[in-house]
Amino acid sequence: MGMTIAEHSRRRTIAGPRAAPEADDALFRLTDVIRVYREEDVETIALRGINLTVQPGEFLAIMGRSGSGKSTLLNLLAGSDRPTAGRVQFRGRDLATADEEVRTAIRGREIGIVYQSQNLAPMLSLEENVRLAAWLAGRPLDLPGARLALERAGLGPRGGHRPAQLSGGEQQRAALGCVLAARPAVLLADEITGELDHKSADVVLQLVQDTHAADGTTIVLVTHNEEVAARADRIVELRDGLIAAERRPR
């Protein structure tokens, strides 16, 4: 059983206060991040004191088994969740203390998020989905721009199709195309190849890599798959809510 919040705080008090980090160019900086979920009298500690930086233009893979804290960490980076303790800074601004309006604006304009389940509007065509996503991010696209985004995703001829008319791999590429059309500074991807066959997964990952190489987009990709993680510049392994290891791909 891990430390409670009180035990963690006592340990920090005994050790003395942590010095404030020096200013740097980190895109994300997480400092002593703890996330506890409570339901009635049951307490679950998802993250137990995470210290992590992500640099602009980096491709970072976060690995770990189910329940290790991967998705919790991604949600904190997205600003869609707040830590129980600690700081989550984006470009020097603490998402933990920012109000909801600010966090929503950052998510909409600077951070793109793709999940295992594609968030596509089922009654809209792919072209309409792309234009809607760009409009919501405050970067409206005309029809040629939407078509170009779909061409980059390898779906140029399918722009008039609805999501249900596509395979699982095509839907995932369409979801990526929608997010990337808004030109986010950061792409957060949560197990985006988890339900795809090997060939479809390879196409999706190649699109992520091409975006990283061509646009310098910062990528944070959550996966339990070593082969997927090997595409990244750096791998962080989580175990029981802690960083167990950091390494470069072989």
Image (spheres, rainbow, N blue to C red):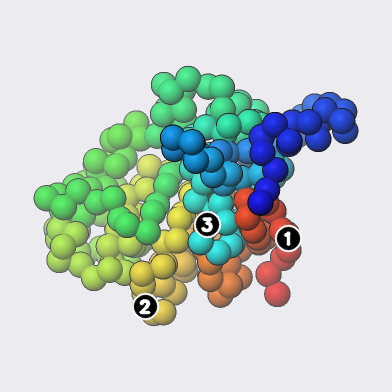
Real-space CA distance between mark 3 and mark 2, rounded to the nearest whole angstrom: 23 Å
Q: Residues within 10 Å of mark 1 (few under 14, many from 20)?
A: few
Above or below: residue 148 compared with residue 131:
below
Residue 28, picture quadrant: top right
Real-space CA distance between mark 1 and mark 3, rounded to the nearest whole angstrom: 17 Å
Q: Where the C terminus falls, by quadrant? A: bottom right
In front: label 1 or label 2:
1
**Which badge, 1 or 2, is on the more N-terminal residue?**
2
- What residue do we see at 41% from left, 29% from top? 104
Q: Which mark is residue 83?
A: none
Real-space CA distance between mark 1 and mark 2, rounded to the nearest whole angstrom: 28 Å
In front: label 3 or label 2:
3
Tag 2 residue: 197
Per the image, label 3 sits on a secondary structure element best described as loop
Tag 3 residue: 67
Expressed as whole percent of the image width and height from the top left, the position of residue 86 reads 66, 31
Q: Residue furthest right?
A: 15
Expressed as whole percent of the image width and height from the top left, the position of residue 156 reads 25, 63
Query: Hey, what amino acid is under mark 3?
Result: Gly
Residue 45, picture quadrant: top right
Instruction: Look at the image and tell me whether residue 91 can be seen.
Output: no
- What residue do we see at 31% from left, 40% from top? 134
Tag 1 residue: 245
Q: Residues within 10 Å of mark 3 (few under 14, many from 20)?
A: few
Q: Nearer the viewer, residue 11 or 138?
A: 11
Query: Hey, what amino acid is under mark 1?
Result: Ala
Q: Residue furthest front?
A: 41
Above or below: residue 40 compared with residue 232:
above
Q: Nearer the viewer, residue 50 or 28?
A: 50
Above or below: residue 247 compared with residue 7:
below
